[in-house]
Amino acid sequence: MEYAGFWRRFLANIIDTLILSVFGFLLGISFGFLTVFLNDSTAGVVIRSVVNLISYAVTIFYYIYFIGAKGQTLGKMAMGIKVVKLPDNSNPGYLSAFLREIIGKILSAFVILLGFFWMLWDPKKQTWHDKIANTVVIKV
């Protein structure tokens, strides 16, 4: 088992961000036309809020579903890496995916992103969110 390095993980994250950004852009454009026709500022605020909530929900669902069910987002698939649960190298499952992708990444970002860079000196190349969910990222 070979652990995935920083740059592979970083590029996978960029790919996932681009995919989700395109979705958010298309969603924003489609609902943006509504705000043009509704010259009411309250309606515009409500529409933008709904679009933001949908975008956040899709992002959360994307990460929890793909990591939980497959151990790989589309970006991780493209970079040939996978998140696996220790000690049996199984797919993480939805609870571990939630702990890793939501709770763990918030904590990893909390102290000047130190949790993300922790992998640079960790023997298993684990970030804080990997440690919280008891996962590692491996090359496939």
Image (spheres, helix red, strand yellow):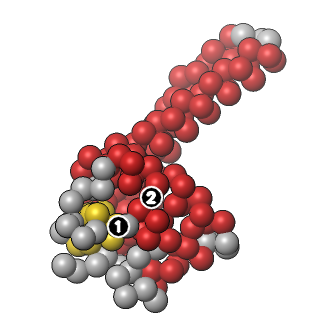
Q: Tell me the SS state at disc 2.
A: helix
- The residue drawn where x is 52% and y is 78% is 117
Quadrant in the picture for the C terminus: bottom left
Residue 5, compared with residue 44, is above or below; it is: below
Q: Is residue 139 visible?
A: yes
- The residue lying toward the viewer, choosing from 95 and 126, is 95
Residue 60, compared with residue 67, is above or below; it is: above
Q: Residues within 10 Å of mark 2 (few under 14, many from 20)?
A: many
- The residue drawn where x is 74% and y is 14% is 43
Is 89 placed left or right of 30 in the picture?
left
Q: Which residue is mark 1?
A: 135
- The residue lying toward the viewer, choosing from 7 and 129, is 129
The answer to whether marks 2 and 1 mark residues whose Cβ atoms lie closer than 8 Å is yes
In which quadrant of the rendered view does residue 29 lie?
A: top right
**Can you give x and y, in whole percent of width and height, for residue 74 in the image?**
31, 51
Mark closer to the chain start, 2 or 1: 2
Is 20 placed left or right of 91 in the picture?
right
